[in-house]
DNA sequence: CCTTTACCTCAAGTATACTTAAGGTTTTAA
DNA sequence: TTAAAACCTTAAGTATACTTGAGGTAAAGG
């Protein structure tokens, strides 16, 4: 238990807000213990957990799914190297799928949006039951609330 | 104005709900005119507009950004083939960026999550100011509220 | 010692993208 | 003609991922 981290330290080092740590704890994504003053104390591995959460979010994985995936990690002791590796491998597959989905979308985008086809049957992007969706990962989000 | 579509027809053919069409109209993403009974009537090109909105959403583009991009299309007359093509080309660039971002993430994921590095400085996914983010598109979302 | 900073809890607020509900009119089909 | 189906409006509700505010305790520095 040496070098336990305070909530402020974790927030600063992980680049997130204290309130986010509270929130993650409230939904069971991370854990902490308390000192005599009822202040949260974190073990070092919380930093890695938060990083992994952030990386997964960048892949578009929701907190619920992240929680599920991370439930295979030990919640109260530091996960081993291979625990993390399994997680990475699991998500890598999802990433591959997503990349392929986006590639298909890209390859069809110009042809499809710009084409003359007005028929719902022929145009792959014309409705939600399109072929891409069937072969892909489902809706793929790239972010953007960017004003650009 | 022949073959004007009702809101129900558009919803069915585009694979979305009537309420979604109301909503899109309320935020200025699509437009309609009214018949004598105050019912909405749509021109054929609304189908294409909706399809494009859906495709853009699959790329993760938010409605605000979609609206901005589509603001260069004529709102009350059918856009020309080249109008659509410009839009496609514009988003294709974003797609390329996103794909590259995901590829980087994938290539670093296993090495990074599974690695022994615990230093915030060396690990590219360790905090939000990572290198990928700088070269990429920002947070990239792939969906998922999937229960898997 | 005292003030500033950090921490605590719990409730409510924010943004996005819609959906649902309530209460009412119009169209369509039997 | 009459009942079901479709349409209308406005307001409120849903889900996700957090943030902000209110009201109060604890710890650290000068």
Image (spheres, coloured by chain):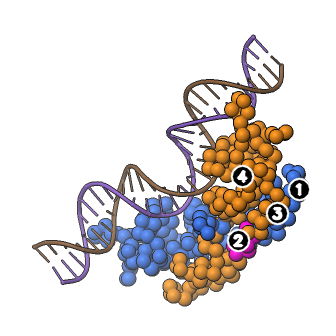
Chain colours: A blue, B orange, C brown, D purple
Q: Which mark is residue B75?
A: 4
Measured as percent of width and height from the top left, residue A52 is found at 56, 74
Q: Which mark is residue B94?
A: 2
Dot 2: element: helix
CA gap, disc 3 and disc 1: 14 Å
The first of marks 4 and 3 along the sequence is: 4
The first of marks 3 and 2 along the sequence is: 3
Give the label, 3 or 1, closer to the camera: 3
CA gap, disc 1 and disc 4: 20 Å
- Give the residues drawn in magenta, as a range: B91-99
CA gap, disc 3 and disc 2: 19 Å
The first of marks 4 and 2 along the sequence is: 4
Which chain is indicated by disc 4? Answer: B
CA gap, disc 4 and disc 2: 23 Å
Q: Which residue is mark 1?
A: A117
Which chain is indicated by disc 3? Answer: B
- Residue beneath the point at 82% across and 69% down: A107
Dot 3: element: helix
1 and 4 marks in contact (CB < 8 Å): no
Q: Which residue is mark 3?
A: B82
Which chain is indicated by disc 2? Answer: B
- Same subunit: marks 1 and 4: no
Give the label, 4 or 2, closer to the camera: 4
- Residue beneath the point at 70% across and 75% down: B97
Dot 4: element: loop
The quadrant the C terminus of chain B occupies is bottom right
4 and 3 marks in contact (CB < 8 Å): no
Residue density around tag 3, few if under 14, some if 14–19, many if 20 or more, within 10 Å: few
């Amino acid at each position: 238990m040496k070098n336990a981290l305070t909530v402020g330290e974790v927030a600063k080092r992980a680049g997130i807000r204290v309130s986010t740590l509270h929130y993650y704890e409230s939904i069971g994504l991370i854990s902490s213990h308390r000192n005599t003053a009822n202040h949260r104390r974190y073990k070092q591995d919380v930093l890695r957990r938060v990083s992994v959460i952030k990386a997964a979010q960048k892949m578009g994985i929701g907190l619920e799914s992240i929680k599920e995936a991370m439930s295979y990690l030990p919640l109260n002791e530091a996960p081993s190297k291979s625990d993390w590796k399994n997680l990475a491998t699991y998500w890598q597959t999802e990433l591959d799928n997503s990349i392929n989905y986006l590639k298909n979308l890209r390859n069809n985008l110009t042809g499809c949006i710009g084409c003359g086809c007005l028929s719902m049957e022929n145009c792959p992007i014309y409705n939600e039951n399109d072929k891409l969706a069937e072969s892909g990962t489902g809706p793929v989000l790239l972010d953007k609330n960017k004003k650009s």
